[in-house]
Image (tube, rainbow, N blue to C red):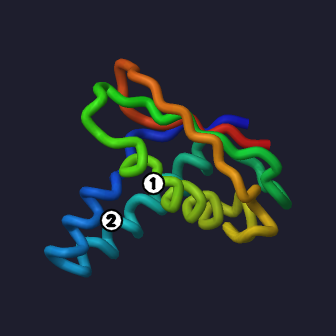
Amino acid sequence: MTLILPELVDLNTYITAERSNRFLAAKIKKDMTALVAQACRLQKIPHFDRIEEFSIVWQHKNKRKDFDNVEFAVKWIKDGMVQAGVVDNDGWKHFPPKTVHCHEVAPVSGSLVSFR
């Protein structure tokens, strides 16, 4: 199963928001989680008791952002999947301990989340 997502907020943007206004950082988390949950619903992602394999292809318009800053958004993805009811929780029982991350330059920024 593949979930297609737009570009999500990266770690540097989130830290800047958190340092300037704690309410702004909370809003970013709420908005990103809701965005992923909505994408799950619109793409009719079914419920899974447990995700066995989890990988993300991060697509970038250019190479300006560091990998680790972008990969931070996996938090929004897992929380959004829980909010949409795709999985019951984002803990060890429901997701594998390893997430495979790949990065590529593409015409549009976003991510392809593959799982089964």
Q: Residue at x 76, y 49 (%)?
A: 46
Taking 45 as reference, is 19 above or below it?
A: below
Q: Residue at x 39, y 22 (%)?
A: 105
Q: Is residue 37 left or right of residue 19?
A: right
Badge 2 element? helix
Q: Earlier in the sequence, mark 2 or mark 1?
A: 2
* Residue type beneath disc 2: Ile
Q: Residue furthest bottom?
A: 22
Q: Position of residue 16 (x, y in %)?
A: 20, 65
Instruction: Tell me the residue that label 2 is attached to.
Output: 28
Badge 1 element? loop
> Residue 48: which quarter of the image?
bottom right
- Which quadrant would the N terminus be assigned to in this image? top right
Q: Position of residue 97 (x, y in %)?
A: 72, 58
Mark 2: give few (<14), some (14-19) or many (20+) Cα within 10 Å. some
- Which quadrant would the C terminus be assigned to in this image? top right
Q: Residue furthest right?
A: 49
Q: Residue at x 78, y 64 (%)?
A: 94
Mark 2 against mark 1, which lies toward the viewer? 1
Instruction: Tell me the residue that label 1 is attached to.
Output: 73
Q: Position of residue 36 (x, y in %)?
A: 51, 53
* Residue type beneath disc 1: Ala
Q: Residue at x 83, y 58 (%)?
A: 50
Taking 67 as reference, is 14 above or below it?
A: below
Taking 82 as reference, is 104 above or below it?
A: above
